[in-house]
Each structure stands twice: as C-alpha cells, then as structure tokens.
C-alpha cells in the first residue's frame, strides 16, 4: 500500500511517499527565483558562421567566450 502526503513548507511543497516494503521517500518542490535578475541583451551573428562571428552587448562585460563545434569540441 502506497501512502502519499503533500504538505506546504515555506514557499514550496513537501511530498512524502510511504510504502510498507520500501520505507519512505521525501521530495521538496520550491519555485526558482532570484531577487537581482537583470535581463541582458546579447546579439550573436551570423548563424551559421563560417569564419567570423560578431558578438555585441550594450552593458554586459564579457570576460570569457568559449566556442564549441557541433560535436562539442573546442575550436
């Protein structure tokens, strides 16, 4: 026999599953959020590219760019 229980916990939910044979399992579900989220605009073109790509942004400071090919190998 499986017993399911759902409880509110903080801003999320707690799911508890109890079974006489396997014991119990507990799962937590919380919404993903951040208070300091800022939308940054990045333009990367052309796509697909052959020899040159352009990357532009208004306010974002880019410290590192890593380019992978179709097979996820570094170029």
Image (cartoon, grey):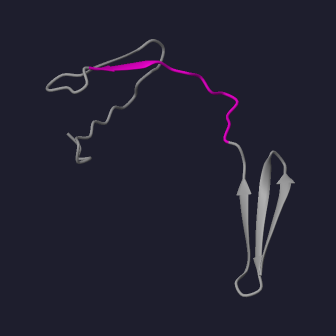
Q: Quadrant of residue 66?
A: top left
Residue 50: percent from left, percent from top: 14, 26
Residue segment shown in magenta:
32-45
Instruction: Please provide percent x and percent y for residue 64.
Output: 36, 32
Q: Which of 73 and 63 is in front in this view?
A: 73
Magenta highlight on residue 43: yes
Residue 17 position in % (x across, y down)? 75, 71
User: Which residue corresponds to the image point at 72% horizontal and 87% vertical from the top-left?
Assistant: 21
Of residues 28 and 51, the one nearer the viewer is 28
Q: Which residue is nearer to you in this view: 6 or 29?
A: 6
Q: In this view, does 75 lie above or below 44?
A: below
Position of the N terminus, as image quadrant, is bottom right
Is residue 52 shown left or right of residue 10?
left
Q: Is residue 43 above or below residue 17?
A: above
In the rendered structure, the answer to whether residue 18 lies left or right of residue 63 reads right
- Identify the residue at image location x=18%, y=22%: 52
């Amino acid at each position: 026999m499986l017993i399911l229980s759902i409880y509110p916990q903080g801003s999320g939910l707690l799911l508890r599953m109890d079974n006489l044979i396997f014991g119990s399992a507990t799962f937590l579900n919380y919404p993903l959020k951040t208070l300091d989220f800022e939308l940054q605009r990045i333009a990367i073109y052309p796509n697909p590219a052959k020899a040159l790509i352009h990357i532009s942004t208004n306010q974002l400071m880019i410290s590192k760019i890593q380019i992978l090919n179709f097979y996820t190998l570094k170029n």
